[in-house]
Image: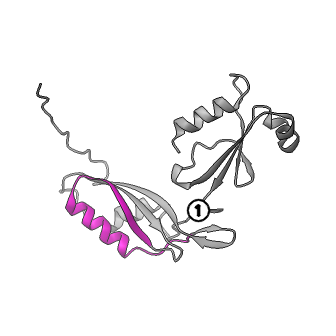
Amino acid sequence: MCRALLAIIALVCCATLSAREPLYVVNGVIVQSIDAIPQEDIESIDILPANEETIAEWGEGALEGVILLRLVYDSPARFDVEGYDNYTSYLADSVQWSDKMPAARVSLRLTIDTEGRATITEVLQSTSRQFLKRVAKAIDVSPRWTPAVREGRPVASIVLVNLLLPEGKNLPVEHAVILR
């Protein structure tokens, strides 16, 4: 579900167009914002109106309604490898792509299975086949993730990866001619 749709839902949920927002509840926990939640992680959304029943259940914070989100997991998948604070940094160090090579980018959707293995589910963008092959190889031999967990059991989850190498180098500008 896209952010624009969530914003529209929030406005419809509110009784008046005020500066206040509805109460956000994610997996039963009240949160300040849902902006950082990737749409792939949302399993369901329920909207509760700002009525007496909702306010009685959720308190004064529900004066503008409540948006309940259920995620596909209770805790997300984590890539815990010493020396790396995220998977993209690990891939940047693992892919053999020298500074002399032209800049290349890949955007991938990965599935982290219940065993912690990462596999490419979808190639969203690739500016170089050679670069994509090298990134795919690095993913194949990468250490396992700690899988996402739901109700105490590991579950598969989706992770988005965007990688541009060499770091700090810009992609070449593509020129196009428009014929009328």
x then y, percent, for residue 6? 58, 38
Q: Quadrant of the C terminus?
A: top left
Does 143 appear in magenta?
yes
Quadrant of the rendered image containing residue 14: top right
Q: From where the camera sits, is residue 96 visible?
A: no
Does 62 appear in magenta?
no
Q: Residue at x 44, y 75 (%)?
A: 143
Three-letter amino acid code of the residue under disc 1: Pro
Quadrant of the rendered image containing residue 62: top right
Q: Residue at x 55, y 65 (%)?
A: 77
Q: Residue at x 52, y 35 (%)?
A: 4
Q: Is residue 132 left or right of residue 162?
A: left
> Which residue is identified by label 1?
76
Q: Is residue 176 left or right of residue 141?
A: left
Q: From where the camera sits, is residue 83 visible?
A: yes
Quadrant of the rendered image containing residue 35: top right
For the residue pair 130 and 28, the one nearer the viewer reads as: 28
Q: Secondary structure at mark 1?
A: loop
- Would you place residue 8 above or below residue 82 in this image? above
For the residue pair 93 and 19, the one nearer the viewer reads as: 19
x then y, percent, for residue 105? 29, 53
x then y, percent, for residue 92? 35, 61
Packing grade of label 1 (10 A; few <14, some 14-19, many >=20) is many
x then y, percent, for residue 29? 74, 52
Q: Residue at x 21, y 60 (%)?
A: 129
For the residue pair 23 and 166, the one nearer the viewer reads as: 23
Q: Is residue 179 left or right of residue 77?
A: left
Magenta range: 118-147
